[in-house]
Amino acid sequence: MNSQFEQVADWLAVSEFSVAFTGAGISTESGIPDFRSPGGVWSRTQPVYFQDFVSSGEARLEYWKQKAESHADFSQAAPNVAHQNLADWEAGGRLRGIITQNIDGLHQLAGSNQVLELHGTAREVGCLDCGWRSDAEPLVKQFLENQTAPECPECGGWLKHATVSFGQSLPADVLEQAVNWAQASELFFAIGSSLVVEPAASLPRIAKSHGARLVIINRDATPLDSLADLAIRGEIGVAISSIAQEFDSRQSPS
Ligand code: NAD
Ligand code: ZN
C-alpha cells in the first residue's frame, strides 16, 4: 500500500544531492491560505504593483493595509510536519536545501538553514532607499496604531516588506543559486506548487534535464506530472511523513 512512499525513501537514501522546491501548498496545513484556492489571498484583494507603490501614497497605504492583514496569518502560524521533516532531512545530511516561493519563513522556523527564498520574506521590512532592514512586527504594529505607511528611521525613505512584489524582478543571486542546485540535484522534490508561475515551472524541468529524479507532491494535477518519475496526488503532511517513516525504518535495523 505504501509502495510510492517506499520508492521515494529508496531514492532519498541513495541521492547525494537532494533539493526540495516548495510552494504555498506546504503552508496551508499551517493555516496560511494558498494562492488559488477559494478564500485565497487574491480572491479577497487586488495586489499592489511595485510601480504604484513607488508612485502613489494611496497605493502605499493600501499595501500596508494588506500586509498588516496577512501579517496576522503569518505571525500566528507554526511549521507543520512537512516543514519539520524537511528540516530533519537537512540536519541528517539527506537534503542539500530548500528553494521556496513562500514568504512566510516557516522553513526557517522549523530549523532549516539552507533556504533560498525566491520571493523574499514577509518577516522583514526594508528601506527602498538606504537598505535599512528591520523585523516586520514592530512596523506592522506601528501601522495599525496610526494607519500611516511607516518611513525609514535612518533616511525617511519608503519602507516595504522584503518580498518581491508584482512588477519587481526576482533577486538574481538567489535565482542563480536555485538553478545551480536544480542542475546539481540527483533527487528534486516539487511540493505544494501548481508549477505554473516562473521559475516554478522551469526548475523541475532543469533538474530533470540534468539527470535528477523528479518527485511531485501536490493535491491537484500540475502541468509537469507527466515529466515526473513519481507524482503523488494527496495531502502533503501525510505524504512527507509517510516518506520520512519509510526512510527512518531503513536507518534503524529491526
Ligand atoms: P499555488 O497556490 O499556485 O499552488 C498551491 C498548490 O498547492 C495547489 O496546486 C494546491 O493543490 C496545493 N495544495 C494546497 N494545500 C495542499 C495540501 N495541504 N496538500 C497537498 N497539496 C496542497 O502556489 P504556488 O505555486 O506557490 O504559487 C503561489 C504564489 O503565491 C507564489 O508566488 C507564492 O510566493 C505566493 N504565496 C505564498 C504564500 C506563503 O508564503 N505561504 C501564501 C500564498 C501565496
Ligand atoms: Zn532608509
Image: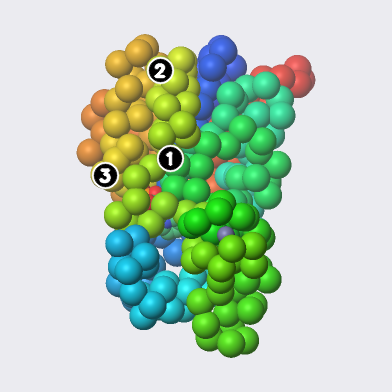
Check contact, mark 2 vs mark 1: CB within 8 A.
no
Point 38% across, 77% down: residue:
57
Q: Which mark is first along the chain, 3 or 2?
A: 2
Point 53% across, 86% down: residue:
147
**Distance of label 1 from label 3 (alpha carbons):** 19 Å
Q: Residues within 10 Å of mark 1 (few under 14, many from 20)?
A: some
Tag shown at residue 56 = none
Q: Circle 1 is placed at which residue position?
A: 171
Q: Nearer the viewer, mark 1 or mark 3?
A: 1
With respect to residue 21, does 250 lie above or below? Answer: above
Relative horizontal placement of residue 76, taking residue 7 as reference (left or right): right
The amino acid type found where label 1 is placed reads Pro
Q: Nearer the viewer, residue 187 or 45?
A: 45
With respect to residue 100, does 13 lie above or below? Answer: above
Rendering coords of residue 249 (x, y %): 68, 25
Q: Nearer the viewer, residue 146 or 220?
A: 146
Q: Which mark is first along the chain, 3 or 1?
A: 1
Beta carbon at label 3 within 8 Å of ligand 1 = yes
Count of numbered marks:
3
Point 62% across, 86% down: residue:
145
Q: Which mark is first along the chain, 1 or 2?
A: 1
Tag shown at residue 196 = 3
Rendering coords of residue 24 (x, y %): 44, 52
Tag shown at residue 183 = 2
